[in-house]
Amino acid sequence: MVYVVGVPTIHTAIGTSAFAVATNAFTNMLSHARLGTIKWRCAGMYSIAGGAGAFLGSILGKIVDGENLLLLFALVMLIVGGLMFKGRHHGGDPDAQCDRRNAGKVLTSGGVTGVFSGFFGIGGGFLIVPGLIASTNMPIVNAIGSSLVAITAFGIITALNYARSDLIDWPLAIVFVTGGIVGGIAGSLIAKHLATRKAALNTFFAIIIFLVAIYMIYHGLRASFL
């Protein structure tokens, strides 16, 4: 929204993207539910803890300078991308579940992820997926499906907070939602296909994160020195 569409106010871009991401996550969640990739108990636990974190993070995000938010966001993406690439050969346990043994890890990871999601005004998928994998040892295809439940919750909470400050461009949000629904259906099928190839989905996920982060850092530094 900032670099391609040209939304002039970064906080408006954050609020608008939060609404669009939440709506798209919900529709894409339906596709993953049909494919059977969602672990509902894990998704619910993560969403409850993360929802509280997202509310706190969205309050903090509105009082921080927009340009600084984007650079911080990019740096976090580089770290997460590196961790995902390092663990790209880890297949995970298809039978992994959330219970008393890992409840603490899941809730803590969800809360921290929610703060980052609300702070940066994102759905948080690039954080939720590694968080679910680390706290439950589930395969990435299940983490992607389950993350959509949390992304929907985080995005709605963040969007409502920004909407109270009139920081959502509603016509633009609708355009993004329309495109996201089509792309999400295709993406869920691609994810299901790549999940059958060892490390392919993990590697693809990490590369996308790296590319977006580098692009954001480049534009951020360019804006600072020009």
Image (cartoon, helix red, strand yellow):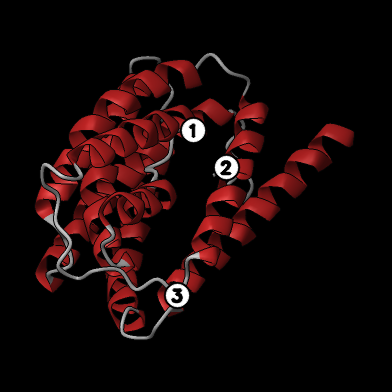
Residue 4 relative to residue 182: left or right: right
Q: Secondary structure at mark 1?
A: helix
Nearer the N terminus, badge 3 or badge 1? 3
At 20% from the left and 45% from the top, the residue drawn is: 102
Residue for point 30% across, 33% down: 108
Specify the label residue 20 is tagged with.
none
Q: Nearer the viewer, mark 3 or mark 1?
A: 3
Q: Nearer the viewer, mark 3 or mark 2?
A: 3
For the residue marked with disc 3, what is the amino acid?
Answer: His
Other residues around mark 1 within 10 Å, as few (<14) / some (14–19) / many (≥20)? many
Disc on the earlier residue, 2 or 1? 2
Q: Is residue 181 above or below residue 174?
A: below
Identify the image quadrant of the N terminus.
top right
> Could you tell me the amino acid type at mark 1?
Phe
Q: Secondary structure at mark 3?
A: loop
Q: Nearer the viewer, residue 30 or 86?
A: 86
